[in-house]
Amino acid sequence: MKATLSNAFHQMKRYPSAVVGSIIILLLIFMAIYAMIAIPYGEAVRLWRGADNVWVQTPRNARPAWLNYFYQEKQPVTMRMTTEDNPDLKSIVDLGGGVATSDFLFEFDYQYDGFPSEISVFLNATFASARPNVAMKWIAPDGREIQLGELAVRTNENFSISQDTRIQRRLGGALPEKGLFADPADPNKVLKGTYQLVGEGLIFEEGSTVDATLVVYGQLHGLAGTDHRRRDITVALLWGTPVALSFGLVAAVGSSIVTMFLGAASVWFGGWVDWLIRRINEVVMILPLLPILIMVGLFYSRSIWVMLSVVILLGIFGSGILSYRSMFLQVKESGYIDAARAYGAGNGRIIVRYMIPKIIPTLIPGFVTQVPAFVFLEATLAVLGLGDPVLPTWGKLLNDAQTNGALFNGYFYWVLEPAFLLILAGLGFAMLGFALDRIFNPRLRGI
């Protein structure tokens, strides 16, 4: 068998489809490994659930940043500046008696053709009883100064400039994210140049501090964009890879191997064993898989591992057992089986050492081509709202996109990105599986 597998590996190089399919599968495996290392399981679940307002500093429904390479009019990408990461943006002057100024200055060059989607300032303060006071103003490239407001800062303060009606009135009714960046000569046009946000803070206690973060939310964000809950879609695209591969591989390999052993036992032992396996097979073949999984998800559990167990359980007694049974019937009549029986080999040894290795070469192409079917099955369950409630997956992305009218609202990336990865996974395993089928089945090589 080792010689057969080694020979098959060398023959794969002669099939371009096998090479391309292998490259695609290796790429997906690399993505899966990277996802599990870069974003551990617990962190992935926390990010996707949006715990602790983790996505509050990302824009809502933002397209991928790389789309700017295709836009003639460049759209803004999210910009974030903070005094916590760059203390040079903050200056502190002690006025004596526990009173001090804590000023900050955010300066950035804005050269985009579109307006941002939102603007917010996040303030973090430490104090015992007297809350620090902060006054902020906006300085445009043409020198105009616009007062943004003054507030007493709590421990965590989110000053949403875009939702402040006082600023909107100062801008003549224009939305702040547009009015602050608009050209006075043409309010529909962006005034490009260097903008400043100046904060003048006053603290009243020894040891009190004030840190600020300015976020100018873009129309574009990140590698894959964001969804309606501000979540970075990259998280689900990356973590959907190990989920899809593990579900597809475990279901395909598990059902194929167990089915092969049952087929061998059915042929070798015959009698009531063969009768029982055949009757179970006949019952399972008339059971619809998808409706059963839907009922399990609705009435029992939507855990991916529960679904996987049901898929394997129904798969091992599926139509594949008839194919293996017909192959083992031919193997059972071979001369070396009679020879093994003559020198006293036991039933288990004959099945494991002599019958199964004979058909393993035909098993490999079979379960490789089965993987995409199970990958799409997991995605289908998620699209129907029966996906795992914890894990971020490709199917969940499609379900969220459908629920929130992504195509209707023009968020095509939300649908196309997970769909592309699903098609890529199916294509990779299909190309490799068909090539292996030709290698292990000489009758197909001329087709």
Image (spheres, helix red, strand yellow):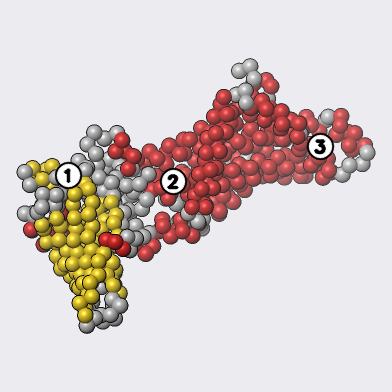
Q: Which of marks 2 and 1 is in front?
A: 1
Q: Which of marks 1 and 3 is in front?
A: 1
Along the viewing direction, whichever of 92 and 155 lies nearer the viewer: 92
Looking at the image, tell me whether mark 2 or mark 1 is earlier in sequence order. Answer: 1
Q: Which amino acid does label 2 sit on?
A: Leu
Q: In this view, does 198 lie above or below 110?
A: below
Along the viewing direction, whichever of 169 and 74 lies nearer the viewer: 74
Residue at 10% over, 49% down: 142
Along the viewing direction, whichever of 25 and 349 lies nearer the viewer: 25
Q: Is residue 7 above or below residue 64?
A: above
Q: Name the residue under label 3.
A: 354
Q: Name the residue under label 2.
A: 237
Can the viewer see residue 443? Answer: yes
Q: Quadrant of the N terminus?
A: top right
Residue 146 falls in image quadrant: bottom left
Residue at 59% over, 43% down: 249
Q: Which of marks 2 and 3 is in front?
A: 2
Q: In which quarter of the image is the C terminus?
A: top right
Can the viewer see residue 317? Answer: no
Q: Residue furthest right?
A: 343
Left or right: residue 60 compared with residue 201: right
Where in the figure is residue 59, as x and y percent of width and height? 29, 52
Q: Which amino acid does label 1 sit on?
A: Lys
Where in the figure is residue 382, as x and y percent of width and height? 45, 48
User: Could you tell me how far apart the alpha carbons at marks 2 and 1 are, in whole angstroms?
Assistant: 35 Å
Q: Name the residue under label 1.
A: 192
Looking at the image, tell me whether mark 2 or mark 3 is earlier in sequence order. Answer: 2
| Mark 1 crowdedness (10 Å alpha carbons): few <14, some 14-19, many ≥20 | some
